[in-house]
């Protein structure tokens, strides 16, 4: 794998200008890498800038109110990432005296930090030669070495890490890791669409030389997602909408939501809500990793302000600025806001 020189040169000339690259201190790397998990760079940019403005240090993040944190994260999804980020910040403050841990082993002890993120922080912020292997890098390496290993299996990751470590330049591990990620994100694209003509590895890449780019990497298919039909109750009273908090554990843990239940149930009476009027109110679909919600909205005009314990009425300002709702409910946003004062 004749990689480092052409790859580093290519990275120097082609790396995208991204805000977290301008000053790669460990906090910025941690926040950006956490946001980038399962989320595109273009979607993360504005979130990252806003997050850094409002919570510029580990201490600020550790001390932030959870609702404020979730509001900053609203729309990015996978909210456990935000919670773990704050847990990690609290650990750094309490267990490491506010100093960012600077070894891969210590980084791995932080909440939400797995091998990839630990490798990214250690190499980019501290110059330690350890690989950082995400999905993009798995794809690039599988093609470069022409590997038929299933990249969904741990054995592939183990072998690829060894291969990367063997060629990693000890004086620029952070750039090398980022170059591999960048190549995967911008040139060695998935779904049979690599742009080999502008790739710095085209003269020695096995997949390209053997015309196997369409069949590599090998990946076992993911299990099919479960579909749940749900009714979402948009309950209004005097210009406010009813919200409830989701349980502290599980899907979308602790976030606020419009009350919703599996379709076919009729929970209004159980909630103590007497509808003066109900009507169908749109529909939407949201895809989670293992499940899809197919949602039907039902607008309910309640004849009193009685709500179950823990639920709240939110006006226009509160819904916009205080309560964090997952993007799953974005399809109902216009409909709800049009009825709020
Ligand atoms: Fe990917 Fe093509 Fe480059 Fe090989 S030559 S690493 S397949 S873009």
Image (spheres, rainbow, N blue to C red):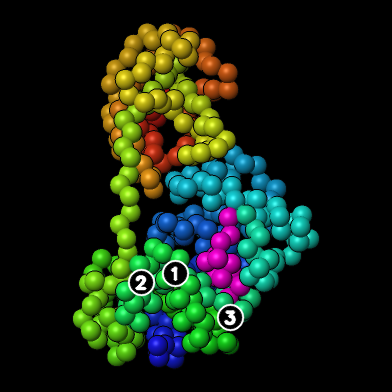
Q: Which residues are magenta?
A: 112-123
- The quarter of the picture where the N terminus appears is bottom left
Q: Residues within 10 Å of mark 1 (few under 14, many from 20)?
A: few
Residue that badge 2 annotates: 149
Residue 265 screen position, x and y as percent: 36, 18
Q: Residue at x 54, y 23 (%)?
A: 312
Asked whether the viewer can see residue 322, the reply is no
Residue 341 screen position, x and y as percent: 45, 24
Residue 239 screen position, x and y as percent: 44, 20
**Tag 3, which secondary structure?**
loop
Q: Residues within 10 Å of mark 2 (few under 14, many from 20)?
A: some
Distance CA(mark 2)–CA(mark 3) = 25 Å
In primary-sequence order, the first of circles 1 and 2 is: 2
Q: Are marks 1 and 2 in contact (CB under 8 Å)?
A: yes
In terms of depth relative to the viewer, which is nearer, 293 or 148?
A: 148
Distance CA(mark 1)–CA(mark 2) = 8 Å
Residue at the outermost right position: 97
The nearer-to-camera label among 3 and 1 is 1
Residue that badge 1 annotates: 155
Q: Is residue 77 above or below residue 161?
A: above
Is residue 82 left or right of 257 when viewed as pictured?
right
Q: Residue at x 64, y 76 (%)?
A: 126
**Tag 2, which secondary structure?**
loop
The nearer-to-camera label among 2 and 3 is 2
Q: Residues within 10 Å of mark 3 (few under 14, many from 20)?
A: many
Residue that badge 3 annotates: 129
In primary-sequence order, the first of circles 2 and 3 is: 3
Q: How many marks?
A: 3
Q: Residue at x 47, y 48 (%)?
A: 78
Q: Are marks 2 and 3 in contact (CB under 8 Å)?
A: no
């Amino acid at each position: 794998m004749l990689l480092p020189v052409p790859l580093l040169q290519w990275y120097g000339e082609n790396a995208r200008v991204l805000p977290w690259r301008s000053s790669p201190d460990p906090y910025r790397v941690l926040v950006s890498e956490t946001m980038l998990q399962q989320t595109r760079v273009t979607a993360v940019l504005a979130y990252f800038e806003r997050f850094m403005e409002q919570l510029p240090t580990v201490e600020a993040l550790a001390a932030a109110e959870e609702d404020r944190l979730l509001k900053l994260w609203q729309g990015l999804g996978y909210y456990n990432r935000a919670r773990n980020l704050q847990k990690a910040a609290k650990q750094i403050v309490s267990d490491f005296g506010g100093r960012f841990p600077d070894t891969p082993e210590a980084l791995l002890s932080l909440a939400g930090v797995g091998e990839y993120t630990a490798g990214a922080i250690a190499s980019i912020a501290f110059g330690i030669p350890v690989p950082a292997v995400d999905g993009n890098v798995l794809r690039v390496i599988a093609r470069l070495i022409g590997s038929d290993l299933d990249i969904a299996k741990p054995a592939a990751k183990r072998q690829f890490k060894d291969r990367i470590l063997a060629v990693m330049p000890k004086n620029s591990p952070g750039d090398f890791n980022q170059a591999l990620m960048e190549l995967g994100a911008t040139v060695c694209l998935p779904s049979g669409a690599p742009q080999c003509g502008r790739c710095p590895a085209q003269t020695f890449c096995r997949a390209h030389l053997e015309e196997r780019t369409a069949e590599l990497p090998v990946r076992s298919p993911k299990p099919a997602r479960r579909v749940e039909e749900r009714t979402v109750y948009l309950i209004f009273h005097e210009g406010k909408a009813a919200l409830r908090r989701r349980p502290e554990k599980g899907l979308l843990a602790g976030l606020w939501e419009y009350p919703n239940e599996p379709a076919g149930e009729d929970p209004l009476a159980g909630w103590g809500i007497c509808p003066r009027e109900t009507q169908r109110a749109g529909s939407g679909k949201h895809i989670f990793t293992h499940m899809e919600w197919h949602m039907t909205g039902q607008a309910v005009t309640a004849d009193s302000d009685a709500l179950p314990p823990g639920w709240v009425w939110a006006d226009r300002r509160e819904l916009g600025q205080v309560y964090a709702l997952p993007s799953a409910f974005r399809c109902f946003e216009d409909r709800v806001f049009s009825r709020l004062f």
